[in-house]
Amino acid sequence: MRNLVESLGDKLHQAVGGGPLVVQRPLPAQKPEFGDLQVSAAMQLAKPLGKKPREVAAILKQVVDADPAVAKSEIAGPGFLNIWLK
């Protein structure tokens, strides 16, 4: 699981242009109804990227959904990304 989380974190970082922006790696979800992993990076990245948090979450969702280990993902609330693994 650690390698998967690191891999997803690296892909998310690249999706927002890399560089000095720090993208928080996916964390284990607090409740099962929120999936296996959660990403809250969209809210912290919105201002530096000049986008709304849900727009950033949509970019991150595309990256996550392309990973073969991911069954599905969904954007929740102001920009959380919930991830279910296969």
Image (tube, grey):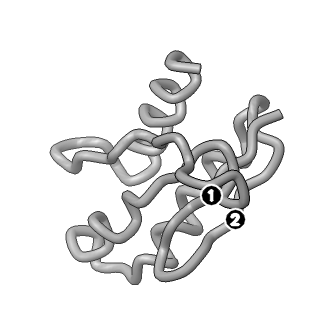
Crowd around label 1: few <14 · some 14–19 · many ≥20 (10 Å): many
Q: Position of residue 57 (x, y in %)?
A: 52, 67
Residue reaching furthest to the front = 31
Residue depicted at 35% across the width and 71% down the height: 43
Asked which quadrant contains residue 40, the reply is bottom left
Residue depicted at 72% across the width and 60% down the height: 33
Q: Position of residue 30 (x, y in %)?
A: 53, 52
Q: Position of residue 50 (x, y in %)?
A: 28, 78
**In the figure, 2 relative to 84: above or below?**
above
Q: Secondary structure at mark 1?
A: strand
Indicate the quadrant containing the C terminus: top left, top right, bottom left or bottom right. top right
User: Could you tell whether 32 is left or right of 72 in the image?
Assistant: left
Which is nearer the eye, 52 or 3?
3
Indicate the quadrant containing the N terminus: top left, top right, bottom left or bottom right. top right
Which is nearer the eye, 19 or 60?
60
Crowd around label 2: few <14 · some 14–19 · many ≥20 (10 Å): some
Q: Position of residue 2 (x, y in %)?
A: 50, 19
**In the figure, 59 relative to 14: above or below?**
below
Residue depicted at 58% across the width and 23% down the height: 4
Which is nearer the eye, 58 or 17?
58
Mark 2 vs mark 1, CA separation in Å: 5 Å
In the picture of the structure, the residue carrying the numbered disc 1 is 82
In the picture of the structure, the residue carrying the numbered disc 2 is 74
**In the figure, 19 relative to 16: above or below?**
above
Which is nearer the eye, 59 or 38?
38
Residue depicted at 66% across the width and 43% down the height: 36
